[in-house]
């Protein structure tokens, strides 16, 4: 008894805890119901107002209809009265007419006949008069016309006679001129015959020459050209075909749209597999209380490897889209990138086939649990069949993708006429894929709702199931978009590309008719285009040839004779030093000569004064000349003079010869000392300037090296910045796509949550009803 009470108490406590947990949900539901009730009340008020308006309008229309019916009745009564009056008046008139006599009727008939005959006779007379007058008028008109025609004929006859005379004179003159021309033409015909004979001779020579050249050309063609690639269909397939550029642009645009759809589909499948992996790790065993089964371990391991098979599918299709070019034809025969995509898609389908048995075993394991009710087991069986359908649909799509990709191989045996059927089957497979995903989402939603009703369902399982449902809804939308894309563009995919190859492309085999293009045409065309671009590469801008030759000569001469130039510079410097020394020497000499000249001029002036003073000459001419040559005694700077007396006379001699030499040497010494000081100061200035220039050159060299380093660094920074900008753009595109997908999934999740709230409200009402029933049962007990 105690154990039973304890178990009952525990059950009551658990039920109480459940009810306690449901109280806030019920409160929220009550508040929502109150808001809905207020909203419905307002809506009811608006509806009542509209009903009142409609009732008023109906009353007014009824009143108007009554008025119209009354008016119609009045008009009908008036019409009946009018018809009765008309009938009465007709009856009265008939009675009067019957009372007339038969005699008056006979007289009236005779009178009518006479009157009609009289009218007929008058008409005949009138018509005969009119015919007579008409005939007379017609004859007069004809007479006047004939007279006019005769006058005109006479005038024409006169003019024709005059014209014939003039024409006769002209014809005679023309005859004379033609005779002259005939003689000239005979001369010209003779000359033309001579020219024709010479032309015939030249034609024969040219024919012989052309025949010889033709034989040589045919021989060279036969020897040098072993085959004609346009003659054979397989060789002509290697030529670049001419095609419609608009068709190629549209094909590239559709491939870009398909790339985005494949990306979305891969992302949806990856999300679905990851969420299924998380769910398998939570239910039926979470790995903490109960260990995972071997099936679920393998299943989770394989699900974790989904991106190894999904990422190559997206990358291969994107690589195929990037390999397309706007100026090259793209058909199934030249689309070699589809082979890699088909290979990776085949690997993905094999991967899905590999994980399908584990998924089915996992569902069987869930059904084998003791807590699994019969309804949930039935839903698991439905999900079991839907998963098998999904695997079959994927295998179907894989077969047609492989067949379409095989068209670009040489060993393909399918004719081109079957390509449209392949695309139609692929479109049908995608439609079936969409319907199967829709069925999968509905069955999984029903399964999830039943699982969440179980008391043992954890909260993590609920959140993970919501994520799986959102992933399924997103995957369903992506599949619907892909199926719609194929359905709308199926006509373009099935249509043949508007292109043709050179030469004869017609084959005797009916299954291989039409132009053929090899898969390697695009690669060969790109190689040839690159080769032609390398041949026609523009030469960079350069210095003109003459200037370059002159610069080279000067550069060679300067590099070869650098030492000689340095030697010439040193020689020129020495020569300049010598010339400066000579210049200084001659400057000193000129100064000394100037001093001497000044002294001689002073002496000449003194002698002239002495000659003027002495009126009588006291000696011979020689003595006077010696006196005239004597120096001035009063000049202070002059040297000391002494007089020598002899028998011939007196002679003044000076002792300043040695003094002049000493002063000259001192002046030279002073000048050289000053010059040495000046040159040393200039040398010091030049050394300081050279040191400064050298330092500036070093600084400029360092600045130049730093600037080059900074230039390289800035170029690298610009390159990295451009790369980061492109990376940011790509990230922005990916984030926007992710946000859009997340928003779509969130909207789907919100819709699912609303559905769940409605279901919870229904469950709350059921619980309320159960609680009321339990309370009533307790009261009755």
Image (cartoon, rainbow, N blue to C red):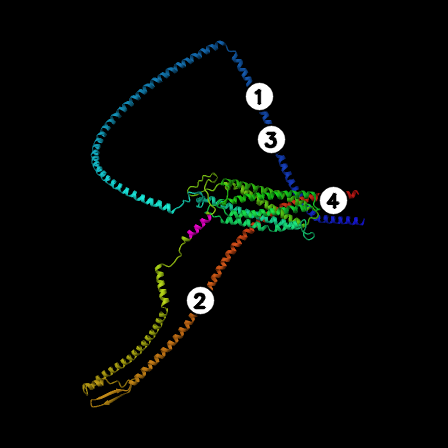
The residue stretch that appears in magenta: 522-533
Q: Nearer the viewer, residue 558 or 687?
A: 558
Q: Position of residue 586 (x, y in %)?
A: 30, 77
Closer to the chain start, of discs 3 and 4, is 3
Closer to the chain start, of discs 1 and 3, is 3
Closer to the chain start, of discs 2 and 3, is 3
In the drawing, does residue 605 fall left or right of residue 365?
left
Q: Residue at x 49, y 58 (%)?
A: 718
Q: Nearer the viewer, residue 467 or 443?
A: 443
The residue carrying mark 1 is: 81
**Distance between the Cα atoms at labels 4 and 1?**
82 Å
Q: Position of residue 739 (x, y in %)?
A: 57, 50
Q: Residue at x 26, y 25 (%)?
A: 153
**Distance between the Cα atoms at labels 4 and 2?**
96 Å
**Distance between the Cα atoms at labels 1 and 2?**
130 Å
Q: Quadrant of residue 665?
A: bottom left
Q: Residues within 10 Å of mark 1 (few under 14, many from 20)?
A: few
The residue carrying mark 2 is: 701
**Distance between the Cα atoms at labels 3 and 4?**
59 Å
Magenta stretch contains residue 527: yes
Contact between marks 1 and 3 (CB within 8 A): the answer is no
* Label 4 secondary element: helix
* Label 3 secondary element: helix
Nearer mark to the viewer, of 1 and 3: 3
Nearer mark to the viewer, of 3 and 4: 4
Contact between marks 2 and 3 (CB within 8 A): the answer is no
The residue carrying mark 3 is: 64
């Amino acid at each position: 008894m105690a154990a039973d009470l304890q178990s009952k108490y525990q059950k009551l406590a658990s039920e109480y805890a459940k009810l306690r947990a449901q109280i806030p949900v019920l409160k929220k539901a009550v508040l929502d119901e109150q808001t809905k009730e207020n909203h419905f009340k307002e809506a009811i008020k608006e509806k009542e107002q509209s009903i009142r308006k409609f009732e008023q309008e109906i009353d007014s229309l009824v009143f108007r209809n009554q008025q119209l019916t009354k008016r119609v009745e009045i008009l009908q009564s008036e019409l009946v009265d009018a018809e009765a009056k008309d009938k009465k008046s007709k009856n009265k008139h008939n009675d009067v007419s019957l009372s007339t006599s038969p005699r008056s009727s006979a007289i009236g008939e005779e009178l009518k006949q006479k009157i009609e005959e009289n009218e007929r006779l008058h008409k005949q007379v009138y018509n005969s008069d009119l015919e007579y007058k008409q005939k007379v008028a017609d004859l007069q008109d004809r007479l006047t016309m004939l007279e006019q025609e005769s006058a005109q004929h006479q005038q024409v006859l006169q003019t024709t006679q005059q014209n014939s005379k003039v024409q006769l004179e002209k014809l005679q003159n023309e005859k004379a001129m033609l005779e002259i021309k005939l003689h000239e033409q005979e001369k010209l015909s003779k000359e033309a015959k001579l020219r024709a004979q010479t032309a015939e001779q030249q034609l024969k020579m040219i024919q012989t020459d052309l025949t010889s050249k033709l034989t040589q050309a045919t021989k060279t063609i036969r020897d040098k050209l072993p085959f004609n690639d346009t003659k054979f269909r397989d060789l002509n397939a290697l030529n670049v075909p001419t095609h419609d550029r608009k068709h190629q642009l549209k094909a590239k645009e559709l491939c870009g749209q398909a790339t985005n759809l494949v990306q979305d589909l891969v992302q949806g499948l990856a999300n679905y597999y990851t969420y299924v992996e998380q769910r398998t790790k939570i239910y039926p065993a979470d790995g903490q209380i109960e260990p995972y089964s071997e099936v679920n371990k393998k299943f989770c391991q394989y699900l974790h490897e989904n991106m190894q098979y999904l990422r190559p599918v997206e990358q291969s299709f994107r690589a195929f889209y990037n390999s397309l070019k706007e100026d090259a034809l793209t058909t199934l025969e030249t689309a070699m990138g589809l082979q890699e995509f088909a290979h990776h898609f085949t690997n993905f389908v094999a991967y899905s086939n590999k994980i399908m048995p584990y998924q089915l075993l996992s569902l069987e394991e869930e059904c084998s649990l003791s807590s699994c009710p019969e309804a949930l087991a039935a839903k698991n069986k439905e999900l079991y069949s839907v998963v098998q359908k999904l695997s079959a649909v994927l295998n179907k799509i894989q077969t047609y993708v492989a067949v379409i990709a095989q068209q670009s191989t040489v060993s393909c045996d399918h004719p081109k006429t079957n390509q449209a059927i392949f695309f139609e089957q692929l479109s049908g497979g995608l439609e079936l894929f969409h319907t199967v995903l829709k069925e999968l989402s509905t069955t999984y939603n029903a399964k999830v709702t039943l699982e969440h009703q179980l008391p043992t369902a954890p909260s993590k399982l609920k959140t993970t199931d919501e994520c799986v449902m959102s992933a399924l809804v997103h995957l369903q939308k992506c599949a619907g978009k892909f199926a719609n894309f194929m359905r709308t563009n199926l006509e373009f995919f099935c249509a043949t590309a508007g292109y043709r190859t050179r030469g004869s492309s017609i084959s005797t085999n009916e299954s291989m008719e039409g132009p053929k293009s090899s898969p390697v045409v695009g690669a060969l065309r790109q190689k040839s285009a690159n080769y032609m671009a390398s041949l026609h590469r523009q030469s960079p801008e350069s210095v003109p040839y003459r200037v370059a030759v002159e610069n080279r000569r000067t550069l060679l001469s300067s590099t070869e004779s650098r030492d000689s130039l340095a030697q010439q510079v040193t020689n020129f410097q020495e020569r300049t030093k010598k010339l400066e020394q000579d210049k200084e020497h001659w400057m000193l000499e000129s100064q000394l000569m100037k001093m001497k000249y000044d002294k001689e001029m002073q002496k000449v002036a003194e002698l002239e004064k002495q000659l003027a003073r002495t009126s009588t000459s006291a000696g011979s001419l020689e003595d006077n000349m010696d006196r005239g040559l004597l120096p001035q005694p009063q000049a202070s700077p002059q040297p000391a003079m002494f007089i020598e007396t002899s028998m011939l006379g007196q002679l003044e001699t000076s002792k300043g010869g040695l003094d002049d030499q000493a002063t000259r040497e001192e002046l030279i010494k002073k000048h050289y000392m000053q010059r040495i000081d000046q040159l040393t100061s200039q040398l010091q200035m030049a050394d300081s300037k050279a040191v400064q220039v050298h330092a500036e050159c070093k600084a400029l060299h360092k600045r130049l090296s730093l600037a080059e380093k900074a230039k390289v660094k800035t170029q690298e920074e610009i390159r990295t910045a451009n790369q980061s900008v492109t990376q940011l753009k790509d990230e922005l595109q990916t984030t926007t796509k992710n946000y859009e997908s997340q928003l779509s999934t969130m909207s789907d999740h919100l819709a699912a949550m609303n559905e769940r709230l409605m279901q919870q409200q229904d469950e709350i009402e059921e619980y309320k009803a159960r609680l009321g029933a339990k309370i009533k049962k307790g009261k009755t007990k």
